[in-house]
């Protein structure tokens, strides 16, 4: 049994902006079910405080230079027995809405201070200096918001081992150099093999350079980030650390995402009752203001940002509207994409339905009601929506990169024959390739038995957390014997 402090900036159902929350809400519970002692630590945002209650203050920590003492509030991750520790420091975290962005979608101007504070508290707890009487053997950090913790811990003697997981290398937490000095970080961390990145402060480098072991969320992405194309200037460092870097595929919560029991969807179904999916399609059409039709219903859910290939979809929106398809898209993100999608829906009200915003319920209903799921991501560290789609018998149409390449088997003639196909892949990020692949899906969709066979194979795939958690445990073990 190991003692693990799992540090993250979001965790479902306490607070969520994307897949990091799904992972942070599931992996700690999976580790616990394998008999490891886990504490999930995150900032005490108002939503998190509401949802993790009842809360008990278990210690206070006064960091030098801070405006007031931080309290550590202990609660539970809903639906599990995992203890949650919320770092309650109102000057940094008592803000409604998104954990990283203000109401206008801009980064909070003090993000560096906020997450540096969080990392310092994590470090104090990790070192057993917070009066908690609990000494983790492993500190598992996730993404840039937690990157300073491995760096600070590297300066300590007798410290726990550190693991840093990259969920998305595109978000690095880079700030002007003066922020490093303003934060009062130890000067020995300021060099090009440390926190400095082109004369800026890089939070993510704290993880990449100083954690004992690194992981990312799929084997393919682990390889991709070691290349200039996907490495964002950090590929050299990642190649240097290649022997410490693992790709461990995310799992999904099989209870939360189960078409046989999902409370959000119109009608339950499973692989033997696939025809019941039709009722979910009708409900989706009604909800997205689309006419009833038997055309191929494409679903899409996600952040409307460049990563997700929204521009590829917009490039082909006119020819797409000529095909026997409908599109139900749920998302929110950059204004330019939101506007362009709304305009497309206004031009083609019978073909394209758009819902801007964030809705767990609708996300489930899109997975259940769509025939196929669109995920033309330019890059995708793992991706969860394609895994939900597989489970919902909604073959994903994906750009075969990162976790998409590792989880979707293209419906080539051979794979269809062998009954291994689970979706449709394209291998070059262009609108043309996406359109051709949708065309290929349409051909198969016209042959119902073939389509159903792909959907059933998709539903039989198991991406559970248990096997991923075992791989993390193996990584922790390696780390502890460093
Ligand atoms: P990323 O973390 O890059 O956003 P993932 O596919 O790993 O991508 O995870 C995204 C998660 O966020 C999924 O659980 C998805 O359903 C959810 N999600 C994204 N956008 C929305 C939205 N607008 N409404 C509801 N859920 C959303
Ligand atoms: C990131 C990635 C996504 C991944 C998620 C959880 O947000 O963009 O691909 O699934 O983290 O690891």
Image (cartoon, grey):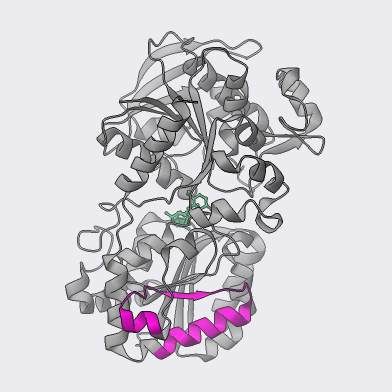
Point out residue 357 in the picture as x, y percentages from the top left corner. Answer: 49, 58
Q: Where is residue 251 in the image (x, y as percent from the top left)?
A: 37, 51
Side (left or right) of 119 relative to 272: right
338 vs 420, nearest the viewer:
420
In the rendered image, which quarter is residue 364 located in? bottom left
Per the rendered image, the range of residues in magenta is 414-443
Q: Which residue sits at x=69%, y=45%? A: 234
Residue 193 vs 395, above or below: the answer is above
Q: Indicate yes or no whether the magenta region holds residue 432.
A: yes
217 to the left or right of 264: right
Front one among 180 and 72: 180
108 left or right of 71 in image: right
Q: Can residue 275 be seen in this view?
A: yes
Image spot of residue 219 (x, y percent):
49, 53
The answer to which quarter of the image holds residue 63 is top right
Majority secondary structure of magenta residues: helix
């Amino acid at each position: 049994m190991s003692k693990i402090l799992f540090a993250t900036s979001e965790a479902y159902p306490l607070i969520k902006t994307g897949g990091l929350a799904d992972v942070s809400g599931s992996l700690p519970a999976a580790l616990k079910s394998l008999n490891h002692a886990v504490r999930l630590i995150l900032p005490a945002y108002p939503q998190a405080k509401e949802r993790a209650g009842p809360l008990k203050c278990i210690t206070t920590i006064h960091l030098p230079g801070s405006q007031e003492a931080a309290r550590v509030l202990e609660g539970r991750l809903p639906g599990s027995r995992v203890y949650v520790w919320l770092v309650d420091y109102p000057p940094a975290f008592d803000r409604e809405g998104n954990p990283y962005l203000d109401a206008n979608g801009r980064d909070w101007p003090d993000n560096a201070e906020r997450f540096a504070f969080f990392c310092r508290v994590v470090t104090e707890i990790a070192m057993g200096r917070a009066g908690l009487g609990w000494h983790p053997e492993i500190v598992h950090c996730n993404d840039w918001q937690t990157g300073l913790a491995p760096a600070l811990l590297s300066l300590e003697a007798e410290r726990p081992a550190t693991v840093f997981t990259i969920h998305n290398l595109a978000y690095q937490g880079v700030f002007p150099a003066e922020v490093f000095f303003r934060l009062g970080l130890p000067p020995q961390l300021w060099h090009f093999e440390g926190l400095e990145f082109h004369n800026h402060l890089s939070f993510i480098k704290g993880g990449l350079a100083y954690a004992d072991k690194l992981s990312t969320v799929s084997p393919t992405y682990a390889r991709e980030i070691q290349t200039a194309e996907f490495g964002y200037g950090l590929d050299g460092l990642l190649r240097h650390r290649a022997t410490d870097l693992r790709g461990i595929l995310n799992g999904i919560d099989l209870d939360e995402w189960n078409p046989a029991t999902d409370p959000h969807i119109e009608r339950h179904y499973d692989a033997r009752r696939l025809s019941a999916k039709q009722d979910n399609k009708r409900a989706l059409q009604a909800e997205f203001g689309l006419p009833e039709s038997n055309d191929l219903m494409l679903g899409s859910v996600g952040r409307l940002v460049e990563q997700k290939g929204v521009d590829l979809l917009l490039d082909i929106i006119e020819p797409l509207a000529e095909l026997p398809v409908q599109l139900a898209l749920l998302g929110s993100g950059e204004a330019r994409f939101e506007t362009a999608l709304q305009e497309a829906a206004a031009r083609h009200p019978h073909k394209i339905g758009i819902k801007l915003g964030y809705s767990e319920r609708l996300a489930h209903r899109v997975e259940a009601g769509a025939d196929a799921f669109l995920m033309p991501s330019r890059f995708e560290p793992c991706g969860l929506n394609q895994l939900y789609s597989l489970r919902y018998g909604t073959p994903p149409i994906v750009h075969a990169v990162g976790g998409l390449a590792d989880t979707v088997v293209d419906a080539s003639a051979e794979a269809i024959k062998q009954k291994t196909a689970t979706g449709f892949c394209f291998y070059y990020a262009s609108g043309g390739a996406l359109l051709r692949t949708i065309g290929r899906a349409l051909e198969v969709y016209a042959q119902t038995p073939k389509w159903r066979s792909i959907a059933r194979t998709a539903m039989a795939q198991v991406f559970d957390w248990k096997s991923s958690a075992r791989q993390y445990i193996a990584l922790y073990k390696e780390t502890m014997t460093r």
